[in-house]
């Protein structure tokens, strides 16, 4: 009887998860600006609190943070729209160059005994396919910015109510200190992670832009901005950010210089990711490599492209606030962790 009850409980739990995921996927267009605003508040609230601690009136600290965020957001959007529009005008010329280079490559392959049928099998190597890839990538990036106005509007109200919300949360959970501690740990760790990841990503992108500038690569600043943005996507974000400038490098610089660019780009990224980052993110987010990889796929499927950017903070939120507090799901939370080398 106990076994049957346990099975029924498991099935009910699984059904509940499916319903929740289906609901989240249905509400993705509404949830994404709300979640973006929430994590933006987690990043900016410590700055807001620091300004207040320096003696600034609350309204002045609020206005300084708000205007800074709005100015940065609007500048990034305008820059991306302008750069992508300019890139689109260059695509036909790039297409001709790609076709010329691929025709030369095909000729060399034919001389080595590769048949026409073998070449035609490489349908992904067609110029129109490569151009379509670039267009789809830039369209996706712009699509993620379509709710910028709504996100900023929600952020305005969230930041304004953040001090009172924090006070009310502490008052409401004064009889449950463990829950309050989990909320505070989640907010502090997420805020710290996003800020450190942000400035490390900016530094990485700056060095990469210098590399592209020295090589004379077109749209170096655009690729740097994309590198900074995709820095927040674990495991696969780096490869997505590398693809467009590498394609342009092949067109403009030729295969050998493009290979040098790819190696240098990878070395720069790995230096900051594996040498510099662990010193500042020493504790990490306590997620296994498999979980971080699956998190990107699952959250991107649920929320769209923005889900990939918010995958780690959202996964930590689920782990810290929904799984760890309950005995029935503590094992799942433990299995999601990075584990210990000593164990």
Image: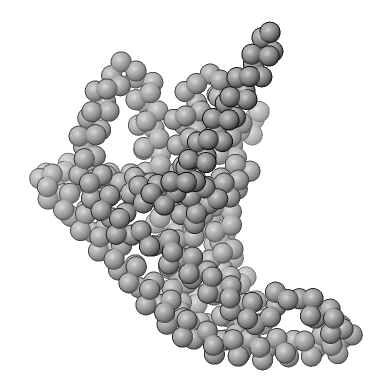
| Residue 53 seen from this side | yes
Instruction: Tell me where residue 277 appears, x and y as whole percent.
Output: 49, 51
Specify the color scheme: one colour
Q: Quadrant of the N terminus?
A: top right
104 on left or right of 79: right
Is 85 rendered above or below residue 13?
below
Residue at 12% x, 50% y is 60
Residue at 20% x, 34% y is 164
Front position in the image: 153 or 160: 153
Is 26 rendered above or below residue 175?
below
Instruction: Tell me where residue 82 appears, x and y as whole percent.
Output: 37, 77
Figure label count: 0
Quarter assignment of residue 92? bottom right
Q: Quadrant of the C terminus?
A: top right
164 on left or right of 294: left
| Furthest residue toward right | 113
115 on left or right of 50: right
Front position in the image: 24 or 121: 24
| Residue 193 seen from this side | no
Instruction: Tell me where residue 171 appears, x and y as whole percent.
Output: 24, 23
Front position in the image: 138 or 59: 138
Front position in the image: 60 or 80: 80
Instruction: Tell me where residue 10 appears, x and y as whole percent.
Output: 62, 23
252 on left or right of 62: right
């Amino acid at each position: 009887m106990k076994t049957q009850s346990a099975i029924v409980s498991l099935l009910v739990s699984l059904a509940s998860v499916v319903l929740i995921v289906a609901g989240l996927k249905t509400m993705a267009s509404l949830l994404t600006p709300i979640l973006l605003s929430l994590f933006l508040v987690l990043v900016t609230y410590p700055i807001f609190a620091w300004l207040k601690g320096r003696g600034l009136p609350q309204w002045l600290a609020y206005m300084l943070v708000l205007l800074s965020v709005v100015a940065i957001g609007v500048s990034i959007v305008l820059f991306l729209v302008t750069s992508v529009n300019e890139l689109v005008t260059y695509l036909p010329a790039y297409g001709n160059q790609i076709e010329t280079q691929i025709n030369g490559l095909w000729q060399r392959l034919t001389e080595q005994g590769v048949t026409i049928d073998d070449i035609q099998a490489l349908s992904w190597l067609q110029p129109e396919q490569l151009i379509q890839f670039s267009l789809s990538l830039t369209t996706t990036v712009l699509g993620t910015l379509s709710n910028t106005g709504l996100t900023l509007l929600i952020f305005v109200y969230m930041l304004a109510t953040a001090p009172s919300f924090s006070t009310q949360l502490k008052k409401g959970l004064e009889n449950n200190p463990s829950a309050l501690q989990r909320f505070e740990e989640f907010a502090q760790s997420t805020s710290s992670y996003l800020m450190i990841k942000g400035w490390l990503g900016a530094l990485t992108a700056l060095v990469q832009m210098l590399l592209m500038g020295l090589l004379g690569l077109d749209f170096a600043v655009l690729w740097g901005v994309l590198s900074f943005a995709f820095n927040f996507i674990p495991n696969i974000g780096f490869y997505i950010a590398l693809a467009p400038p590498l394609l342009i490098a092949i067109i403009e610089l030729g295969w050998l210089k493009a290979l040098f660019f790819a190696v240098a780009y990878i070395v720069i990224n790995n230096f900051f990711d594996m040498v510099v980052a662990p010193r500042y993110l020493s504790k990490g987010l306590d997620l296994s490599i498999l979980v971080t990889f699956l998190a990107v796929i699952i959250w991107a499927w649920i929320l769209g492209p923005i889900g990939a950017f918010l995958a780690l903070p959202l996964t930590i939120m689920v782990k810290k606030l929904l799984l760890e507090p309950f005995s029935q799901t503590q094992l799942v939370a433990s299995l999601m962790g990075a584990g210990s080398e000593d164990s």
